[in-house]
Image (cartoon, rainbow, N blue to C red):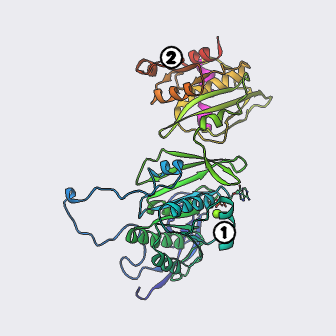
Amino acid sequence: MRGVARQKVVFACQSCGYEAPKWLGRCPGCGSWGTLVEEVTEAPAAPGGGHVAGLSTGDRPRPIVAVETAEAVRIPTGSEELDRVLGGGIVPGSLVLVGGDPGIGKSTLLLQLAHRVAEDRGPVLYVSGEESARQVRLRADRLGALSRRLYVLAETNLDRIEEHARELSPLVLVVDSIQTVYRPALPSAPGSVSQVREGAAELLRLAKTRGVAIFLVGHVTKEGAIAGPRVLEHMVDTVLYFEGERHASFRVLRAVKNRFGSTNEIGLFEMREEGLVPVPNASELFLSERPLGVAGSVVVPCLEGTRPLLVEVQALLSPTPFANPRRTASGLDLNRVLLLLAVLEKRVGLQLGGHDAYVKVAGGVRIEEPAVDLALAVALASSFRDVPADPRAVVFGEVGLAGEVRAVGRVEQRLREAEKMGFRRAVLPARSLKNLAFRSTMELIGVETVAEGLEASLGG
Ligand SMILES: Nc1ncnc2c1ncn2[C@@H]1O[C@H](COP(=O)(O)OP(=O)(O)O)[C@@H](O)[C@H]1O
Ligand SMILES: [Mg+2]
């Protein structure tokens, strides 16, 4: 039991969790404006009674060589995509946060996971604070997730959730969502910064002491921070982010943080009536609607974690009478597009100033790696000149400000994927080609400058 708790009013930032004693227009923690809201919290009565962000297991110092290294056996989720993102399955005793926009498919994903684990391994408890048990049952009917060892609980009181979890001893506990559950001992409302933080701390303790793997669902605010307070991200072992365009059926699951694996991995799913279906051959899906022989479309082999992906980059340039042409980018960093437009003007001599430029990555994925530069430059020039790029060629390479094409990593994997998908030519950095041991059946064209890259892809 906690001693006498004093109530305290603080102003907590919805974005980063910073707590200020008085209201401020701008958060000193993260610099965002208008994010501080008033909250009533308890002053911690004793050390360890209030904020618990880390572990306290009563451990003693011991020589590092005496620490056992054997990793707990991971629990497969039944989905290769999900396993890869988690770093090879569920780690017992881990706390995982699954974030994403409402309606993106978080409950669907976790209900499917809960069913698979229950079916193959042991009991799973799915706690829903948003939907009634009947609603969860109806969804489970649709998804075919009716394992006998899958238990449903519609509850928001964390004390009771914990009681049930101790009684049932599930392998996996799903809490959907962290914003709806609350600790009755705290005076503030569910969803507030202190409730979310204290709730997660309580669940962290449960995970570490009982060895149960816990998945927390977190809704994302408009600003894109998971569960508002980013404090959650520091506490949990793994943060997965579920994204995609709501209108498209395609979904990407990304690890933003992972104490048990790489953060580069992505999982690809398609949302169907029967639930989320893994997409093993993503390149095929991304290229399925590609227009052939149309200017402005270029295929780039990019890497998301260990996984090569062929995606189509599209550009459309159209003349505008206005002095300030529009530039928009979807699926790509706009700054990157602006930079390449400048490089094309200055180093290649294309007069793009009088044109609006629209750029997008087809299929709703996002490309962040610089290897997309050259493909983007070719797409822009292709649309500008109205000359289609070779539809059987892939293009990749980083572009520097001098218009030079720089080497990129893991060239062999990119080329293998392009080969597999039936491409015949690849335009790539000359430097990458020089160091390449791999023998491709494709025609490989190494280029040193953007101008050479355009010539190789579009002709002179
Ligand atoms: N009967 C249905 N048939 C097909 N898809 C459905 C059906 N009901 C819901 N969905 C899909 O499931 C999505 C909701 O997924 P859900 O897992 O509840 O999202 P979240 O938990 O992230 O809010 C909806 O956007 C919709 O696309
Ligand atoms: Mg939901």
Q: Determine which residue is flagged by label 1.
A: 137
From the viewer's perspective, is residue 398 above or below residue 335? above
Give the image location of residue 226, x and y in percent.
Answer: 56, 59
Under tag 2, what secondary structure?
Answer: strand
Say which label, 1 or 2, has the lower sequence index: 1
Which numbered dot is residue 446? Answer: 2
Q: Is residue 343 magenta?
A: yes
Q: Quadrant of the N terminus?
A: bottom left
Q: Residues within 10 Å of mark 2 (few under 14, many from 20)?
A: many
**Magenta stretch: helix, strand or loop mostly:** helix
Picture quadrant of residue 146: bottom right
Taking the spot 44% from the left edge, 58% from the top edge, the residue there is 75
Mark 1 touches mark 2? (CB < 8 Å): no
Structural distance between the alpha carbons of marks 1 and 2:
57 Å
Left or right position of 456 against 239: right
Taking the spot 53% from the left edge, 62% from the top edge, the residue there is 119
Tag count in the figure?
A: 2
Give the image location of residue 324, x and y in percent.
Answer: 73, 33
